[in-house]
């Protein structure tokens, strides 16, 4: 055996199944970004900072909502679920990417790739459904204010959140389990920094018709229908708001859903941008930039949008930090 063949054997290893030419990949390669060492160092620092900012920002949102009784309302209950989903969403892809950059390795196991696909779809769908639920909450608050406390009672809110989780898990399971029927070719290179389901399907040697049907059906049920529900909710909100005679009343109504509308625009705008970029061009760099915007930048910006545009959230964060910082100072002083 030639020495030049050893790295290839280490990178492309397959487990042969009993059915002759059917193979199941034991390892994929995530090509990611530039292979230059100096660029890799900069990317590691950049994405580590982004990850820490995203994790800290969303965690502060959750802690502020849990610690302030004034924020124990349906809107902030769903917001805390959204922040948790954003933490999990970015944690599905970025830590593995940072580990690969640090170890100078591009490999991800077959099981690891399937797990990444599963959790990526779960938390992506959960974001989508929670934004839909929050749009419904704003619709009830503005269009039916007298019945708001009756409709959005704690039991119903918990049911909406639990339903969003269950639907996301079941949809992801359906899309992920259908991958187990596929065999893969010898080219196991994924031109992304994570296991993106469409890119993995491109590597399959066997027929992917069933997989494509499942993917398109799940996208229609878990993305297109919720988007239409959001648009319908805001159509009703705008119609109801325009009927308010006073300018102050209109401003108050629009301000209550301004943050949510900004997050919806960012989420669907970057998601649509990723889809259009992958469909319109074969450029790997363009697709990577679109993926970064959708999977990393959006979860990072959500806490800033809700904290900067929401007076109640800014007050809760100030009170939370006001309690945490003096406690940390006292602890350090006591230890010293």
Image: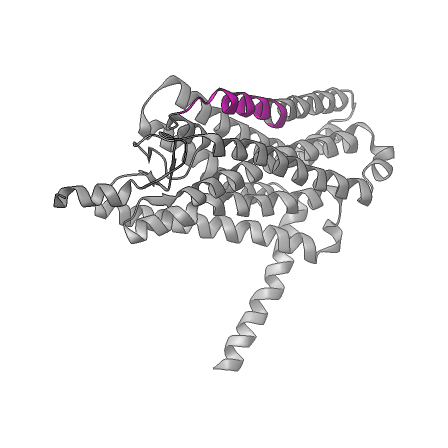
The rendered magenta stretch, by its main secondary structure, is classed as helix
| Residue situated furthest top in the rendering | 280
Left or right placement of residue 86 versus residue 35 in this view = right
Does 324 appear above or below 317? below
Left or right placement of residue 325 versus residue 50 in this view = right
Residue sitting nearer the eye, 97 or 187: 187
Left or right placement of residue 15 versus residue 296 in this view = left
Q: How many marks?
A: 0
Look at 50% across and 81% down and name the residue there.
335
Q: Where is residue 311 in the image (x, y as percent from the top left)?
A: 65, 45
Query: Which residues, given as a range, are shown in magenta?
Result: 206-222
Residue sitting nearer the eye, 255 or 204: 204
Residue 68 figure quarter: bottom right
Question: Magenta segment: does it hold 126?
Answer: no
Does 265 appear above or below 235? below
Q: Position of residue 330 (x, y in %)?
A: 56, 76
Look at 62% across and 42% down and name the residue there.
82
Residue 63 figure quarter: bottom right
| Residue situated furthest left in the rendering | 2
Q: Where is residue 336 in the image (x, y as percent from the top left)?
A: 47, 82
Look at 65% across and 45% down and name the residue there.
81
User: Which image quarter holds the N terminus?
Assistant: top left
Residue 134 figure quarter: top right
Question: Magenta segment: does it hold 212?
Answer: yes
Look at 75% across and 29% down and name the residue there.
139
Q: Position of residue 115 (x, y in %)?
A: 49, 43
| Color style of the picture | one colour
């Amino acid at each position: 055996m030639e020495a030049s063949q050893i790295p290839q054997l280490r990178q492309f290893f397959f487990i042969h199944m009993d059915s002759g030419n059917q193979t199941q990949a034991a390892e994929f390669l995530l090509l990611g970004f530039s292979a230059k060492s100096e660029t890799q160092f900069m990317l590691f620092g950049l994405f580590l900072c982004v990850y820490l900012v995203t994790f800290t920002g969303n965690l502060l949102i959750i802690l502020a909502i849990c610690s302030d009784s004034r924020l124990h309302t349906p809107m902030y209950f769903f917001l805390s679920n959204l922040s948790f989903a954003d933490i999990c969403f970015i944690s599905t892809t970025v830590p593995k990417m940072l580990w690969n950059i640090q170890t100078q390795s591009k490999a991800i196991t077959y099981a690891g790739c399937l797990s990444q696909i599963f959790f990526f779809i779960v938390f992506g769908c959960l974001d989508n459904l929670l934004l839909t639920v929050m749009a419904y909450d704003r619709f009830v608050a503005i269009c039916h204010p007298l019945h708001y406390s009756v409709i959005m009672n704690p039991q119903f809110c918990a049911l909406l959140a639990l339903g969003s989780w269950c639907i996301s898990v079941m949809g992801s399971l359906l899309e992920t389990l259908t991958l187990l029927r596929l065999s893969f070719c010898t080219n196991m290179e994924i031109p992304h920094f994570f296991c993106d389901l469409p890119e993995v399907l491109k590597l399959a040697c066997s027929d992917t018709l069933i997989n494509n049907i499942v993917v398109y059906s799940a996208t229609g049920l878990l993305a297109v229908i919720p988007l239409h529900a959001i648009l319908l909710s805001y159509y009703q909100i705008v119609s109801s708001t325009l009927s308010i005679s006073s300018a102050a009343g209109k401003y108050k109504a629009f301000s209550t859903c301004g943050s949510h509308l900004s997050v919806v625009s960012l989420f669907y705008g970057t998601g649509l941008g990723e889809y259009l970029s992958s469909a319109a061009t074969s450029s790997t760099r363009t697709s990577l930039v679109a993926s970064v915007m959708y999977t990393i930048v959006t979860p990072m910006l959500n806490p800033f949008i809700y904290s900067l545009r929401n007076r109640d959230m800014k007050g809760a964060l100030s009170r939370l930090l006001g309690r945490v910082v003096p406690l940390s100072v006292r602890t350090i002083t006591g230890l010293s």
